[in-house]
C-alpha cells in the first residue's frame, strides 16, 4: 500500500512539501458523533509550531488548521476528515546553494537517488513541515481515546546530551509539568540545565541530540495483535516514521541486554479486582498485546543535521564542496518532537482500539 | 489489514500454534523464474532450530519444510508459495499447571484479556514456534535479494549480559565467522566468554539478555519511502514483531542522544564514481531511503521469561500462586534470534525492492 | 497488497495449484469463541465437489479439510485459521498436448505473457480447484454471520441457456429447495428443463452458460462504506474474482437502463417499527450501505471453455494448431458455482460486519 | 483498510462533501518525472462538470483544481499529489425539507442507519460531487498510461432507455466522436434520439437510465492478478464504487448465459508476430490477466433518483410523507458518467501497471 498513509482502520494520509502551497491530511475511520472543531487541534499544533520559544527555530508558521470535511454541526460524521494548512511562509528565496549540494544528514541525496529529481526547497517532502498533518490527526486520535476509552497520551523530554531527567513514575507526569518550561522536561532542575546546554550549543553553531519518553495511561489489557502487528511493532514503526529517530525502546529497553530473567520478569499480582504486574519493565505490552499497565517507550533523536557552520559535502556531480545551511533551525529537536511523538502514539492506539473492537468487541 | 500478514508486495501470511498440528506460511509476490527447492530453506531453518547446540533448548523439532505451491519444475511461478511444517513433537502433556496460571513475561494473561480464551499449550500462537514460518520465507527473500540485487543479509550476536563483541566493521563480518561458534558471535574471544556466561546462567536456573546486530550489504541507494513507510520504520516494525525484542536502534542509535551535529553528521564524499558518506553513523538510510551505505541495526533481546525456578504469579481468578516453567528452554535467546532477525530484515528489504521497482524502476 | 488475499478484517489468503500437492487457506480475523470443527466445512465442500452428480465433471476429489490452527477445544481462538486440502488425485499424466498450446477461453496464454512460465498441469493456479479454499473459508463466514448476526446467505441457479427459473421472492427460497435437484434451481419445472438441456449439450461435446442469483437475508441496515468500499463494489469484486464470471448486477440490474426514476425508485414505508422500502429494485444497498432489505444479485457465468471437440488455437510459438481438452469437465458451471458464489458473498459480508463494528459498533 | 481510498500502488484517497468547504484528493504512487500541471486536469473536469449542456443539471461548479503538492517545476516528484477543489456554490439554503425525510433511491436512510447522523445538505459525502476528486486523479492516471504505456481509455453512452447505439468496433471510437454531441454517444443518429428522449423525460419531471461502454486500448498482455485481484474484479469494483451503477459486464457479458462454449470461446490466432484472439467476447482479460485485446465493459446506470415531482417516503420517525427534490438535477446521468467511468478505469489500470512492473517488470 502507498507510503503516504498510516494505520489500518484509523488511517491518515498526508501530502505537502515544506515550501509548497499547502499541507493536507485526510483522516479516515473516525467514529461518528465525536465533538470536533478546529479549536480542538490548536493546542498540539501550537506545541509543534516553530518559533514558540527561544529554544526552537524562529521561523514563523501560522499553522491554522482548516477542516474541510467529515465534521457537520460540530460532530464527526464518520466520513473522511480533511484538514488543510496553507503554507504562508513560502517566500521566494535563493535555493541555488542547496539545489546542487547534498546537505549531510538530510535526504537530499537519497531523494535524488530514488526519484531522479527532488523539490529542493527546504527539504520538500522530507521536511519536518510534514508533521503538522500528523499532529492535527493526533489531536483527533487523542480526543477519541480520551472520550471513548479514558486513555491519556503524554510525552516529555527525558534526556538532552548528557543531562537526564529524574522521573520516578512516567505514568504520573502531567501535561502542566511538561509545559512548565520550553524544553518540555517535567524535572524542573534538569530542564534548567538542558536549556543552558541548548543555548550553549546554539551559540557554538552546533546542535545536540536527546531522548523523549512517551507514556499512554489507561489502555485496557487486550489491545494489539499477537504476531506481525504487535502493538509495540506498530508503535515503533510510528516513531521511526518521524524525522531524526535513531532508536526506540520499550519498558526496560536496551537495559534488558544486561539483565537476568529473575530480575527482568514482572510478576503478576492484583490491585483490587484487577490483575496487574508488580513492576513494569515490560512497558505495558506482552506478546504484542497491551497488559493494562502504562505503555512506556523512549525515542532517541539525533542532533539537528542542519548547521550554520560549514560542513564538507559533494555536489550532484560528486565534486567536493562545503555547505552551511543558513536560516532558522532548532539547535535541539527534542522540545518539538514531544507533540509529534504523542500524535503518532495516539494514532497507533486509536487504530488498535478500532481493530480490537472489530474482532473482540 | 489482518495481523497475521507482513509486507505490501512481498507479503507473508502465517498460521499455526506451537502445539497444534502444523505451521504454515503463504508467501505472495515472489517474482517468477527464481530457482527454488526445499533444500534452499534448510540452512536457515537449521540455524533457527531448537536443540542445535548445548546453548539452546534441547527440544527437538524436525522442521522439515514442504513446499505446497508456487514452484514448478524448480522455479517460482509468480503465484503464492505455501510452505508447511508438520509439528511432530506434539505429544500429549499435562498442561494443568499453566492452563490457569499466568507465566510472568509471557502473553498468557494478555491473550486471555484479549480473546477470552487461549490455546495454553506451550504458548500457542505467541510461541516462538511461529518464527519457523518467517525463517522459511526469509530464506526465499534472501535468495531473491542475492540473485537479483546482490544484497547480502547477515546477523550476529553483539552482546550477552555485560560481554560485548568487538566488531570493527559490521559490513565485513562473514557467515563463516558467525557460524564458527554456537553463540553466533564473530568475535571468538567474546564468544567464549558469552558461552561461559550462558552456561553459568543456565546452571543457576536463570536466563540472560543480549543484543543482536544485523547488517545488509549491497542495498543500492533509493529503496524505501520518505514518510510513513520509511525503510527504517518498516525494518523496526519487522524486528519488534519478533518475540522478546525490547529495543531497536540504527547506526549510532541511542548514542546520538549525547552527540552533537558536528560529530554525528556523516559528510558526503566519493568512492570512485559513487557518492558515499565518509562514516556510517546514519546506519544506511537517510530520510527513510537507503543511502547505499550498509544498513546496520541492533536489537535488544530480553532474557528468556520461562524459568525453571519458581516465580510468583496469579491464577486466572487472581489468586496468588507460584509457577516454574518446566521443560526445555533457551537460557539465552540470542543465538537463535540471529536467523529470525535476518529473515525479517530480508523480507522487509525484498518488499521495498519490489515497491521501488514499481514506482521508480 | 498481494493478489492472493481478499478482505480487510475478515481476510483470506490462499495458495495451491490444481495438480500440486495441496491447497491451503489462511483465514484471519475470525472472532474468538465461535464453535468450529472440520465437520462444519463439509456440507459446502460437498456442494462444490466435482463428481457430485451426472451434471458435473466425474473427476473425484476427496476435499477433506484439515484445520491446522486457530481452533482449540472446539472454538476459534481469534488467531489465524489454516485449512489444508491434500490433492490426492494428482496422478501423473501426459500434459505434452496442453504444455505448448493455448486453450481458448483459459488463462494459459495470459499466464505465459505475465510470468514467462506457467504450471501447465490442469490450469495450475488459475484452475477452479483454487475455490476449494474459498468455500471452506465461506463456511466459516456463514457460521459467523448466522450465529452472531442472524444473516443467511443462499444462492441458486436462475438461468441456463434460454431457460429461466420463475422465482417470485428470492428471499423466500430455502436451501432444501435449492438442493432438491442437482442443477440447484429451486423452480422444479425449470430445473427439469435445465437438466435436459445440460445433458443435451454434453452429448454434443459442448457447454452452456447461465445465471446464478445470490441472496443475503437478515443483513441489518448500516453495513458497508459510502465511497470506494461500497458494499456492492466489494461484493462485485468478490464475484468477479471467481472463474468464468462475465457480469454482475444488483436488484433491477441492467433493466434500469430502460426504466424511469418514477418506476425504479423504491419508496420508503414502514413494516411495524422498521423503516423499509415497498419494493427492492435497489437490491438491498443504497449509497453503498445496506438498507435492511434482502441483498439480491445475479452473476452471468460463461459456458465452460474446455471442450472435448477440437478447437482452433496456436502454440507458444504462434503456430496454428487444434486442441481438444480431454478429460472430465462440467458441461455447465452453474450448479457448482452456487456454493462458490455463496462463499464469496458470505466472506464479503463478514468483513463488512467487522468493519462496521469497528467504526460504528 | 479505510473506505475512502482506492488502489494498491497507484492509490487515491478522497475527502469532501457536496456542500462542505472543499473536496480534496491525495494521489499516492505516481512515478516521478511525469510532466503535470493543473491544465492537464481541466478537460476531463469540464466533461464531468454540471451545467455543461442542456442535458445536465444547470448547477454551476467552477471545479478549478489546485495542485497542492507532489509537482515541482512542472514534473511529478514521486511524492503524494494533493488536488484541492474549493466548493464555491455552497450558499446557505433551506434544508428543512430533506433534513428529516428520506429521499427514495438516495443514501439518506442508510447513512442515518450506519452513523446515527448525516450531513443532510445535498447528499453530503454520498453526493456525486465526490467524483470531482476521482476525475482529477483519473486524468493523471490517463496521462501516465498514455505516456509510459501507450494505453488509451475512452467511454461513451451506449444506451439510454430503449435507444441503443450501433457501435461496430468499440476500440475504434474516438474522443472526437464521443464529444461531438452533449449526450456523448458516438452514433450520431442514436445520439439525436437519446437527446430527444432525455428532454422529453425532463419535461415530464422524470429521469431515465442507460448503459455506458468503456474501452481501454493498448493494454499489453500480462497485467492483472490470477486470483482475487483479477483485473476484471478490480475494474468492476471501481465501477460499482461510482454512484448509480447497478450492473457491470465484460465482453459478451450477460449474453454468455445463452451461449454455448463453441460460440463463446475466442480462438487464438496471430496478427503478425502477436498472438491475438480472432474475436473478443472475453473482453480483453482471461483468468484475470489482460490478453492484449481491447478491454471492453459496460455499466448499467439507474435513472436519477432525485425527482421534482412528489414521491412517497417516510420521515426519520417513520411517519409517511411526500418529498419532491427541488433544484437542479440531471434527468439522465449517462453523459456525465462517461468521464467518471473513464477515470476509475484509468486509475485501476495504472495501479495494475505498477503492480505488474513490481513483480514481473
Image (cartoon, coloured by chain):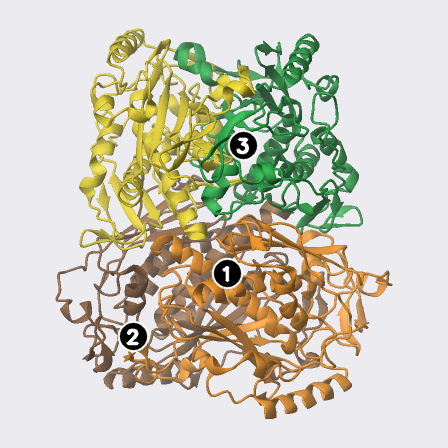
Chain colours: A brown, B orange, C green, D yellow
Answer with left or right where residue A14 lies relative to residue C123. left
The front one of C299 and B229 is C299
Q: Which residue is mark 2?
A: B275
Q: Are marks 3 and 2 on the same chain?
A: no
Mark 1: few, some, or many residues within 10 Å (few <14, many ≥20)?
Answer: some
Question: Are the residues flagged by discs 1 and 3 in contact, CB closer than 8 Å?
Answer: no
Q: Secondary structure at mark 1?
A: strand
Q: Which residue is mark 1?
A: A152
Q: Secondary structure at mark 2?
A: strand
Answer with left or right where residue B240 lies relative to residue B315. left
Q: Position of residue B281 (x, y in %)?
A: 39, 80
The front one of D308 and B141 is B141
Q: Position of residue C108 (x, y in %)?
A: 52, 37
Mark in front: 1 vs 2: 2
The front one of C317 and A354 is C317
Q: Which residue is mark 3?
A: C103
The chain to which mark 1 is attached is: A
In the image, is residue B12 above or below residue A320?
A: above
Amino acid at each position: 500500500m502507498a507510503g503516504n498513509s498510516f494505520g489500518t482502520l484509523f488511517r491518515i494520509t498526508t501530502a505537502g512539501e515544506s515550501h509548497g502551497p499547502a499541507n493536507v491530511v485526510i483522516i479516515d475511520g473516525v467514529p461518528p458523533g465525536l465533538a470536533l472543531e478546529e479549536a480542538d487541534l490548536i493546542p498540539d499544533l501550537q506545541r509543534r509550531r516553530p518559533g514558540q520559544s527561544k529554544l526552537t527555530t524562529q521561523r514563523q508558521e501560522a499553522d491554522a488548521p482548516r477542516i474541510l470535511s467529515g465534521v457537520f454541526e460540530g460532530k464527526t460524521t464518520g466520513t473522511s476528515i480533511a484538514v488543510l494548512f496553507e503554507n504562508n511562509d513560502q517566500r521566494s528565496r535563493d535555493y541555488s546553494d542547496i539545489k546542487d549540494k547534498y546537505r549531510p544528514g538530510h535526504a537530499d541525496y537519497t531523494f535524488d537517488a530514488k526519484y531522479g529529481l527532488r523539490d529542493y526547497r527546504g527539504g520538500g517532502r522530507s521536511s519536518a513541515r510534514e508533521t503538522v498533518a500528523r499532529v492535527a490527526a493526533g489531536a483527533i486520535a487523542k480526543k477519541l481515546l480520551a472520550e471513548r476509552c479514558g486513555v491519556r497520551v503524554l510525552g516529555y523530554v527525558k534526556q538532552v546530551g548528557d543531562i537526564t531527567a529524574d522521573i520516578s513514575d512516567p505514568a504520573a507526569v502531567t501535561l502542566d509539568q511538561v509545559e512548565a518550561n520550553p524544553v518540555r522536561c517535567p524535572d524542573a532542575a534538569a530542564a534548567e540545565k538542558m536549556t543552558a546546554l541548548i543555548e550553549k550549543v546554539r551559540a557554538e553553531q552546533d546542535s545536540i541530540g536527546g531522548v523523549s519518553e512517551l507514556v499512554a495511561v489507561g489502555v485496557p489489557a487486550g489491545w494489539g495483535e499477537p504476531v506481525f502487528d504487535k502493538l509495540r511493532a506498530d508503535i515503533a514503526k510510528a516513531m521511526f516514521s518521524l524525522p531524526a529517530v535513531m532508536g526506540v525502546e520499550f519498558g526496560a529497553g536496551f537495559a534488558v541486554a544486561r539483565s537476568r530473567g529473575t530480575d527482568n520478569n514482572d510478576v503478576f499480582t492484583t490491585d483490587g479486582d484487577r490483575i496487574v504486574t508488580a513492576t513494569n519493565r515490560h512497558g505495558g505490552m506482552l506478546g504484542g498485546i497491551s497488559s493494562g499497565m502504562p505503555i512506556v517507550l523512549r525515542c532517541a533523536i539525533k542532533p539537528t543535521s542542519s548547521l550554520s557552520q560549514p560542513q564538507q559535502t559533494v555536489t550532484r556531480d560528486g565534486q567536493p564542496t562545503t555547505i552551511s545551511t543558513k536560516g532558522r533551525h532548532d539547535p535541539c529537536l527534542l522540545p518539538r518532537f514531544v507533540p509529534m511523538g504523542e500524535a503518532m502514539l495516539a494514532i497507533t492506539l486509536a487504530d488498535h482500539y478500532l481493530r480490537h473492537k472489530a474482532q473482540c468487541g
